[in-house]
Image: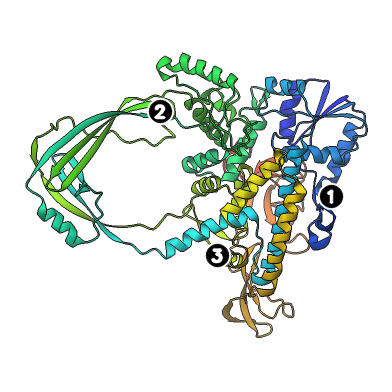
């Protein structure tokens, strides 16, 4: 066995790192957290509240075998390196490994790197450090706070209104969606008018009325303005300005998710899954290569070495006129500045040069990251903007036109940036000239309600309001959908009745705790713990002493919502049928439960069985299809079976590997023999 053992989080990450470190090191993976708070003790919190909020950790049941294997791996090791991700969650995982494994007197060191390249990895191992217990304490405080809030509120809501869960970040995000929907539903359109004057091919709009910006709310007022106009207009000004458009900052987690959602329609979870693969390593010509820096970051900083290489690349590829100036940005106060922005690890590894090694989704995400990082270091675009002003009695009409003089960073990023279309030529108008309009008219318009949240807009608002952290956006949105608190209609979030009821009930007793301000303030307090300026016990005690009395009050006074009747009668006992909510969604059942356990069958058409087109390993004739167990303890679970059943009775458990195949968007699964393929992945390379 190797004398030096390295433990990372991901098996694919271990493969990439292993090839950089050589034969003296054995690299293995914890596959994420190995333990979590127990669900035993008072209230099932896994926290001894009376004894200084002492957490009770237990090895995750699915990880017990892995922990045994890790102990065997490190048994004869002399040095152990904990190389989990470079954030608080990664720091906590390292500590859990240190605290759980049979370390003994072995030397244990923590190594941190922001990108998985040979240079970064070897440099990290040359400069190891000890575990940062301030970071661990911050993560642990967050975990305990969210466990207390989540368990207490979830139990309360389940008993009162049958909602599945609540939480500090989850409920604050849901409140944004519900509040916006209420605003939309209560919106009353207002009539208003705009007035225009056309001169050949140029349309001008009323810009000022008696020196003020006009707001015309009636047809009568619009007609009065039109009637007051003289036949001739005077050109009062024609002026031109050069307007610089600066490139945007490189991507951080939130802007990566927003960009991928807007451009490709990817969910935040899909985007992060693809980015994780790019970070951990992709096979490039037989070598596993980490293509991007760590994808969970809210820092827009770029390393000096990257800036130097990128500037050289811009100079050699585009010329000196496209070379911008890099100013080290001032990050937000609570930004994780130890991180960089999300960028390519090697600027010379262009998207096109490695396209053949990437799936379609990997290529798109890598290209987005690459172009945004490189574009942020290029020169501004320059537009010539001409403004035309015409006067008539007490009115001023205006038209503007923009012409691009120099494309700058847009030469590279035009695919991802919205820019104004080039307008018409206004230079033909001369100051003091008098003109007759070809047409003067008004347009009747109505104000529009605000738009529902897209995933990109929700993430943007969550970031700006301080709700959660970059690493929580995808899981928060996934939870809201899974709990059936929201649905997606035309890629926009619409709260369900249950989601709206959940926020209304929480708002009666816990409005402060589900507000954006509370989430933001808590994140700042957690930052103070991470920086060593605040203590875990003080934060938890103050929170608990304030929160628990509110829970007690809500338990006593919150109205219990009776299930809604469907209008039908139970065929077994004659009692009314009601709508109920489970983790699988809304269903109809007898109101006399548990005495009567009748549940109305789902009349929806059954989903077609997926045929994987993979040959059955037993009979070699049939193909494996995905079926769903209809009874027994595994009811509802999917499994693989031979299409020739009952002639061939081969079956195999089915394990979900990824939400979506990076190549064909179908679900990726693994059978008990370890074979990975897409279900219904016709024509997909992975399917073959």
Instruction: Give the color scheme: rainbow, by chain, secondary structure or one colour.
Output: rainbow
N-term-proximal mark, 2 vs 3? 2
Residue that carries the numbered disc 3 in the rendered image: 500
Task: Report the disc number at residue 58.
Answer: 1
Label 1: element kind: strand
> Is tag 1's residue or tag 2's residue first in the polypeptide sequence?
1
Q: Position of residue 688 (x, y in %)?
A: 64, 37
Q: In front here: 470 or 118?
A: 470
Q: Is residue 12 above or below residue 650?
A: above
Can you give x and y, in whole percent of width and height, for residue 26 in the image? Answer: 82, 27
Neighbour class for label 2 at 10 Å: few (<14), some, many (≥20)?
many
Disc assigned to residue 302:
none
The quadrant where residue 578 appears = bottom right
Disc sitting over residue 410 in the figure = 2
What residue occupies the far bottom of the structure in this picture? 574
Q: How far apart, in angstroms, are the residues tagged by discs 1 and 3?
A: 35 Å
Q: Identify the mark nearer the N-term, 1 or 3.
A: 1
Mark 2 and mark 3 residues within 8 Å of each other at the beta carbon: no
């Amino acid at each position: 066995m190797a004398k030096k053992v390295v433990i990372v989080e991901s098996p694919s990450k271990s493969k990439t790192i292993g090839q950089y470190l050589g034969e003296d090191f054995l690299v293995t993976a914890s596959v994420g957290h190995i333990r979590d708070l127990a669900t035993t003790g008072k209230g099932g919190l896994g926290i001894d509240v009376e004894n200084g909020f002492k957490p009770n950790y237990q090895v995750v049941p699915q990880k017990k075998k892995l922990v045994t294997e890790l102990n065997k791996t490190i048994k004869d090791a002399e040095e152990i390196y904990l190389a989990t991700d470079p954030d608080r969650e990664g720091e906590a995982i390292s500590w859990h490994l240190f605290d759980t494994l049979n370390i003994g007197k072995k030397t244990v060191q923590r190594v941190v790197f922001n990108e998985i390249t040979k240079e970064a990895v070897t440099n990290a191992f040359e400069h190891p450090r000890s575990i940062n217990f301030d970071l661990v304490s911050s993560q642990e405080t967050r975990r305990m706070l969210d466990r207390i809030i989540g368990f207490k509120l979830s139990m309360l809501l389940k008993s009162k209104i049958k909602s599945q869960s609540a939480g500090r970040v989850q409920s604050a995000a849901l409140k944004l969606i519900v509040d916006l929907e209420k605003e939309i539903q209560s919106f009353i359109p207002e009539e208003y008018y705009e007035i225009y004057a056309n001169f050949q091919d140029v349309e001008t709009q009323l810009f000022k009325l008696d020196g003020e910006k006009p707001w015309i709310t009636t047809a009568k007022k619009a007609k009065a303005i039109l009637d007051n106009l003289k036949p001739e207009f005077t050109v009062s000004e024609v002026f031109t300005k050069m307007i610089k458009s600066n490139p945007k900052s490189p991507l951080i987690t939130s802007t990566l998710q927003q960009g991928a959602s807007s451009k490709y329609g990817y969910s935040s979870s899909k985007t992060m899954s693809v980015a994780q693969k790019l970070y951990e390593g992709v096979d490039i010509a037989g070598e596993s290569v980490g293509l991007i820096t760590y994808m969970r970051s809210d820092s827009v900083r770029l390393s000096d070495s990257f800036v130097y290489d990128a500037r050289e690349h811009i100079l050699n590829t585009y010329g000196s006129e496209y070379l911008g100036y890099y100013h080290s940005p001032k990050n937000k106060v609570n930004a994780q500045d130890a991180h960089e922005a999300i960028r390519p690890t090697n600027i010379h590894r262009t998207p096109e040069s490695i396209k053949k090694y990437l799936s379609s989704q990997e290529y798109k995400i890598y290209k987005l990251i690459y172009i945004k990082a490189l574009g942020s270091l290029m020169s501004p675009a320059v537009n010539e903007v001409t403004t035309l002003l015409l006067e008539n009695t007490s009115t001023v009409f205006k038209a503007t036109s923009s012409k691009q003089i120099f494309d700058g960073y847009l030469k590279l990023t035009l695919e991802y940036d919205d820019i104004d279309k080039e307008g018409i030529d206004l230079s033909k108008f001369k100051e003091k000239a008098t003109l007759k309009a070809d047409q003067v008219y008004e347009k009747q318009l109505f104000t529009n309600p605000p738009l529902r949240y897209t995933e990109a807009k929700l993430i943007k608002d969550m970031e700006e309001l301080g709700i959660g952290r970059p690493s929580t956006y995808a899981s928060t949105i996934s939870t809201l959908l899974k709990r059936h608190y929201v649905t997606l209609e035309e890629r926009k979030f619409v709260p369900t009745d249950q989601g709206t009821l959940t926020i209304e009930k929480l708002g009666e007793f816990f409005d402060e705790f589900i507000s954006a301000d509370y989430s933001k303030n808590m994140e700042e307090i957690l930052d103070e713990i991470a920086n060593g300026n605040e203590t875990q016990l003080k934060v938890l005690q103050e929170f608990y002493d304030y929160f628990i009395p509110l829970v007690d009050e809500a338990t006593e006074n919150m109205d219990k919502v009776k299930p809604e009747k469907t209008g039908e009668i139970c065929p077994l006992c004659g009692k009314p049928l009601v709508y109920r909510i489970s983790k699988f969604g809304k269903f109809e059942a007898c109101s006399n439960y548990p005495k009567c356990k009748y549940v109305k069958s789902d009349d929806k058409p059954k989903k077609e069985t997926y045929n994987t087109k993979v040959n059955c390993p037993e009979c070699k004739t049939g193909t494996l299809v995905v079926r769903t167990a209809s009874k027994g303890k595994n009811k509802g679970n999917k499994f693989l079976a031979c299409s020739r059943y009952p002639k061939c009775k081969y079956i195999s458990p089915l394990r979900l590997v990824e939400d979506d195949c990076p190549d064909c968007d179908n679900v990726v699964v693994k059978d008990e023999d370890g074979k990975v393929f897409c279900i219904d992945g016709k024509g997909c390379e992975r399917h073959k």
